[in-house]
Image: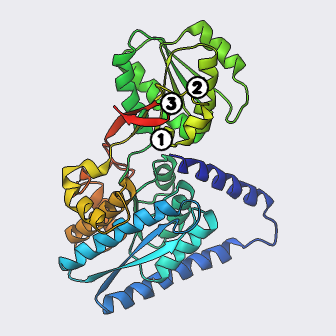
């Protein structure tokens, strides 16, 4: 997903700020004191909520700005989940209260949103939407023992960083990017067994994660005619790459990159009369791909998560979301609903809202949701996620 790019930019900003920090920056003692205050505030707010027989949960996402539609979809699903739980008696006999915070998918805004929710007594946060904001938020939620489940972030770095920091209170209800590599490998091994198959990466964290898994899985499946390579993001000419591909004469080319680069490369391949099948990840769902390919994208295939709205377990929720207005419910609204289901079921099983206890429970048990039965590994990543194929035809992405 394109949200992965936001994390790269956020990470670069962090590194630049760290490099430029001088004597005027906060000391370690001041940083520790600030973190302690956040934790203390969280404890006071939770105690106040408990006295009022409330369980406060949060939703964090882009509720304004360019990505507003995604944040509003998340909110739509979360609000219905809270209403349904309260109608059934709440969580642990206490009324569920949803607090929302707008992070604009930004780094500093995410930190502020996370602190805002903690100060309101949130014990669980459904969010964030973007990679960078989710990682930034996790740095606040972790020390404050707040459970965090993202309904949208597929970037593997999210949980990888959490593991490095020994945070066990972060999970997701969506598959990791690398899963698309595994999914594509299974298909390529059958559809293009004769090869050669070329796997290209734009050298980004997103591209590398997918391409590494794809290449490794193809090797495991016994596909020998596999070649890999990299190119620079945003380049205007692919002449050298095209020349090499003409020598290889591949049957299929998998491009683990963003939709703009895949679009430009697709145009270059077709102009060079290289007719290999072009395959990519879910970023190709962007309608902008077609314009970047200069209308040469016919036949380009990409993987994406199966529509949650088609799951039988979600039928009732989908019908009520449709009836409530707002258009067709997306994966983001249904995933946000499911994340709250996961929290509620785990709170019931552990007889409390302690984030660490819930995090440990979820890593050892499955939970039935509107997305089906979900199960997590030690990192907090889903063990299984369903993907399907789409193919671009005359400017439209058609499901296969």
Asked if marks 2 and 1 touch (Cβ < 8 Å), the reply is: no
Residue 2, x across and y down, in percent: 54, 47
At 49% across and 52% down in the image, what residue appears?
158
Q: Is residue 241 left or right of residue 93?
A: right
The first of marks 1 and 3 along the sequence is 3
The first of marks 2 and 1 along the sequence is 2
Dot 1: element: helix
Asked if marks 1 and 3 touch (Cβ < 8 Å), the reply is: no
> Which one is in front in this view, the residue at disc 1 or the one at disc 3?
1
The first of marks 3 and 2 along the sequence is 3
Which residue corresponds to mark 3? 211
Is residue 299 placed above or below 51 in the rendered structure? above
Quadrant containing the C terminus in the rendered view:
top left
Dot 2: element: helix
Relative depth, front residue between 223 and 151: 151
Using the numbered discs, state the Cα–Cα distance from disc 1 to disc 3 in whole angstroms.
18 Å
Q: Is residue 304 left or right of residue 51?
A: right
Which residue corresponds to mark 1? 285
Asked if marks 3 and 2 touch (Cβ < 8 Å), the reply is: no
Is residue 152 placed above or below 325 in the rendered structure? above
Which residue corresponds to mark 2? 266
Using the numbered discs, state the Cα–Cα distance from disc 3 to disc 2 in whole angstroms.
18 Å
At 30% across and 69% down in the image, what residue appears?
324
Residue 355, x across and y down, in percent: 36, 69
- Residue closest to the far front: 394
Q: Residues within 10 Å of mark 2 (few under 14, many from 20)?
A: many
């Amino acid at each position: 997903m394109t949200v992965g790019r936001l994390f790269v930019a956020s990470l670069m900003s962090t590194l630049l700020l760290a490099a430029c920090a001088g004597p005027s920056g906060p000391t370690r003692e001041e940083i520790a004191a600030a973190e302690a205050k956040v934790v203390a505030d969280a404890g006071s707010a939770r105690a106040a909520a408990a006295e009022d027989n409330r369980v406060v949960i949060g939703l964090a996402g882009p509720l304004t700005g360019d990505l507003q539609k995604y944040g509003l979809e998340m909110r739509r699903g979360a609000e219905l989940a809270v209403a349904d739980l309260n109608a059934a008696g709440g969580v642990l006999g206490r009324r569920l209260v949803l607090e929302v915070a707008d992070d604009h998918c930004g780094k500093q805004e995410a930190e502020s949103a996370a602190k805002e929710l903690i100060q309101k007594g949130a014990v669980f946060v459904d969010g964030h939407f973007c990679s960078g904001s989710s990682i930034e938020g996790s740095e606040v939620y972790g020390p404050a023992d707040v459970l965090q489940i993202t309904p949208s972030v597929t970037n593997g770095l999210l949980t990888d960083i959490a593991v490095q920091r020994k945070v066990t209170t972060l999970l997701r209800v969506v598959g990791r990017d690398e899963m698309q590599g595994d999914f594509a490998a299974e298909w390529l091994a059958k559809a293009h067994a004769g090869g050669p198959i070329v796997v290209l990466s734009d050298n980004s964290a997103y591209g590398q994660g997918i391409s590494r898994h794809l290449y490794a899985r193809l090797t495991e499946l016994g596909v020998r005619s596999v070649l890999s390579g990299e190119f620079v993001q945003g380049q205007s000419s692919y002449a050298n790459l095209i020349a090499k591909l003409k020598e290889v004469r591949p049957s299929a080319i998998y491009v683990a990159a963003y939709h703009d680069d895949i679009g430009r490369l697709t145009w270059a391949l077709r102009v060079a009369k290289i007719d290999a099948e072009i395959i990519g990840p879910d970023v190709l769902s962007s309608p902008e791909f077609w314009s970047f390919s200069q209308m040469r994208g016919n036949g380009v295939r990409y993987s994406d998560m199966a529509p949650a709205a088609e799951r039988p377990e979600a039928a009732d929720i989908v019908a009520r979301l449709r009836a409530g207005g707002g258009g067709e419910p997306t994966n983001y609204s249904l995933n946000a609903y499911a994340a709250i289901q996961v929290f509620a079921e785990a709170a019931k099983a552990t007889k409390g809202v302690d984030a660490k206890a819930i995090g440990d429970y979820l890593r050892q048990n499955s939970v039935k949701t509107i997305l089906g039965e979900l199960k997590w590994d030690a990192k907090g990543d889903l063990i299984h996620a369903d993907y399907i194929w789409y193919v671009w035809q005359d400017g439209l992405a058609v499901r296969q």
